[in-house]
Image: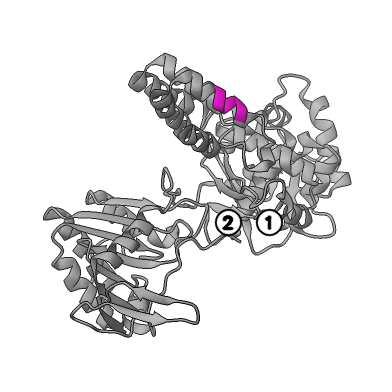
Amino acid sequence: MRQFLFSILIISFAFIATPVFGAETTGRKAVVWPPLAKANILLGKDYFQTTRQAIQEAKESIYVAMYLINVEPVPTDNPASILLEGLISAKKRGVYVKVILDDTTFKVNYNAYKRLQQAGVDVSIDSTKAVLHGKGIVIDSKICILGSFNWSRASLYDNYEFATYIEGPQQAKKLLDYITKIELSPQPPIQPQDPQGLKLPVGLITSPPKPLLFELFTSHSQKAFDLYLYLAKKAQSQHSSTIKINYQEFARALGYTKNYYFNLFQPLRKLTRKYGLIQHKPWSKDLNLIYTSSKADITIPDTYWDYGFYQKLSFPAKYMFLVSLSEAQKSNHNPCWFRSNEDLSRIYYISERAITNGITELEKENILEVYRHKPEEQGEFENRPANDYRLNPLQSQEQFQQALQALFDKYGPDITQKANQLSAQLNEPKDLDKIEIYIGLIKTYGYEKVRKVNSEVASNRRESGFRDLSQVILLLKSS
């Protein structure tokens, strides 16, 4: 699905203490090889002992690029934890330590990330554009340790793994140059948590031939959709599928301030007679919710109601929010997920146009972060990888304004307002991280130059992959 940017496996079979020069004659010409470095193969537990000692003896710098570091929240006898503590100890004695971890395994890497961060180590996550699959270390610009070992108990003690230990400044520089070119995420992925909220069966939007909530969507029954979610939330809080009817309460939950019974009549009738999502006998003071059976749940956070998104979002955005929750929960990289519009349409029965409209609105509200891959060849959009998505926590308007005010106080209202407008031009008026990046660009290149380039980038089609802040930065650097 995504390119492997950093997949390295070098096996050295030579162990030469004294550098020599050699030449090999091919069919065409002689090839002169650089001096061979001192090298050794590390098998099994040799890797742990050698790496631990090399870290302990480091004098100036340690660079680690690692796909996976699986440790506990606190130090233990786990060999991976021991190596991690070695890095922290090196930092404390004045060695510069830089660690880059893969974003796709962030759920596993989270404990290592937090321990390193709290110890003041320079730790980063790579960007979502590629997978950091390599496992390499460079120490004091002269030692390389690289191979198949992740830092986990199983990899270090149990699995059949192998690596190479190389002493040679040329080889160390080559690997270090490669590591320093890894594109980093401006912020770490959000550690997924189990939010408080309404848990619904995923079958409501996926069960063939026509999911029940999909039927509400295609018939434009938005009020019936909103009422069903509200009733389901109420039933969950009461631990009972039977709910006493309160017309005034239900109507206000849908945004009605008067004519409660009249406004509720139609959505209640649809949920009962047309869709079978609730049972309600005439003149009864109670109703019963009907659920479909499913193993996987969607959790709609309470903040969806608390922050007013149930009223603010359009119907396509609401539906795509449920789809995003479903996809993120299924993903091994939660809250990140990856799916083409064609597949989303097939799985959730929603048109690709509605998918695009819903996603665009969620992106504007900073609920969904979208990375659209650029085609390898200009105009060949059909051959691009599927979009990458990251589901963000819901944020109230008050929280956004407070954070924006903090930027006003830090950088000044004029430059912050201009940065906000530039970010809004690319459909991201509420992405505070990007607003702050724009502030930095304005300081570096000047507002007029950034505005001109931003307008040029904004003229591209959204799905082209070129209508993105990264393209703005690329054009500014090349100008």
Q: In the rendered structure, which amino acid carries the disc numbered 2?
A: Gln
Determine the secondary structure under disc 1.
loop
Say left or right for 176 vs 461. Answer: left
Determine the secondary structure under disc 2.
helix
- Magenta span includes 311: no
Say left or right for 339 vs 348. Answer: left
Name the mark on residue 202.
1
Q: In the rendered structure, which amino acid carries the disc numbered 1?
A: Val
Q: Nearer the viewer, residue 17 or 234?
A: 17
For the residues bearing labels 1 and 2, Cβ distance under 8 angstroms: yes
Please report the bounds of the magenta region as a residue range: 452-456
- Residue 467 location, x and y as percent? 62, 36
Crowding at dot 2, Cα within 10 Å, few <14 / some 14-19 / many 20+, comes out as many
Q: Is residue 211 above or below residue 436?
A: below
| Residue 259 makes an appearance in the image | yes
Which residue, given by chain and number where applicable, does mark 2 sit on? Answer: 329
Q: Is residue 49 above or below residue 242?
A: below
